[in-house]
Image: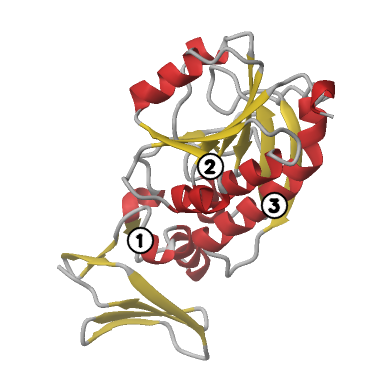
Amino acid sequence: MENNYCYTKIIVLGSGKLAYQCAELSRHYLNNVEVYEYKVTDSTILQKLCEKEGLKYFLCGKKELRNRLLQEEEDTLVVSAGNTYLIPAEVVSRSNLKIVNWHNALLPFHKGRNAEAWSIFQGDAMTGITWHWLTADVDAGDIIAQEKIELDDEITALKLFQKQCDLGIQVFENILEPLLLDQCSGVRQSRISDGQMHFSWEVPNEGMLDIEWDYAQISRFLRSMDYGALQLLGKMYIEWQGQIYSFRKYRIVKKNVEDAIYMQDEDLYICRENHEIVLLSLNR
């Protein structure tokens, strides 16, 4: 069965549950599967999952990761899944490597980092996931497959990201064998004026909640910054009565209240459009 495929090896490059699931699924097709993770911390969930299931796993710094990919001699399908390592052009151009990338948005919209947060903050009605061929330009390669996710007015960045990971593996399961048979040509991305690039250092409104926003925009801001305990985008801030306060947690309750803003203990209450928004445990 393996001899029918155009590749003799699969490398999964990424982090988290999505990368693990891609690797686990890949070895149903090829025995020769390796997992590379770009080193951010010394201990990762991906490492523990791979070790438990007997998957070959390597935690690599930038230089080691580059060298491993450059020195690869087999015909290899590289699956970039939840990957934060920017693969250099010299690796992308290697003739024996074909690289497919998962992106958590409907390209060409929201290229770059933390797309789930920007989809919420900018009030998109729809987002989704994209599998595409990786090129030297970030998130610019031909699209292999896309699936949509409708957004509601309650979803947080963390919950959306989890949905996108789950959808990502579902789609990957459908395209993996065609990829191995070299039957996925891809479709060129359309050019749009608002296909902006988001960088890792960017945060919605620089992390600042504008007290003049209406309820819908406040909600979008809070939910776009909400990664639970991960605090991926850092603290949130608000200016109130000439002071800058930081906060990490909030609460939104739909209730019949008159518009008002007031401080009670260390919590700031913003009552607006029949919603009570509470910014919890403010710090100066």
Q: Which residue is drawn at 63% across and 48% down?
A: 21
List the single residue furthest toward the bottom.
256
Relative image position of residue 63 (x, y in whole percent): 34, 21
Q: Which residue position holds label 3? A: 167
- Few, some or many residues within 10 Å of mark 1 (<14, 14–19, 20+): some
Q: Is residue 93 left or right of residue 15?
A: right
Which mark lies nearer to you, 3 or 1? 3
Compared to 97, does 239 lie above or below?
Answer: below
Q: Which residue is drawn at 31% across and 55% down?
A: 234
Relative image position of residue 269 (x, y in whole percent): 34, 81
Give the residue type at disc 2: Gly
Q: Which structural element holds mark 1?
A: loop
Relative image position of residue 40 (x, y in whole percent): 34, 41
Query: From mark 3 to mark 2, how far is it between C-alphas?
Result: 13 Å
Compared to 36, does 251 lie above or below?
Answer: below
Give the residue type at disc 1: Asp
Kindly indicate whether the residue at mark 1 contacts the one at mark 3 (C-beta within 8 angstroms): no
Q: Residue 82 carries which label?
A: 2
Give the residue type at disc 3: Leu
Compared to 62, does 274 lie above or below?
Answer: below
Which of pointers 3 and 1 lies earlier in the amino acid sequence? 3
Which of pointers 3 and 2 lies earlier in the amino acid sequence? 2
Q: Residue at x 43, y 63 (%)?
A: 226
Q: Which residue position holds label 1? A: 210
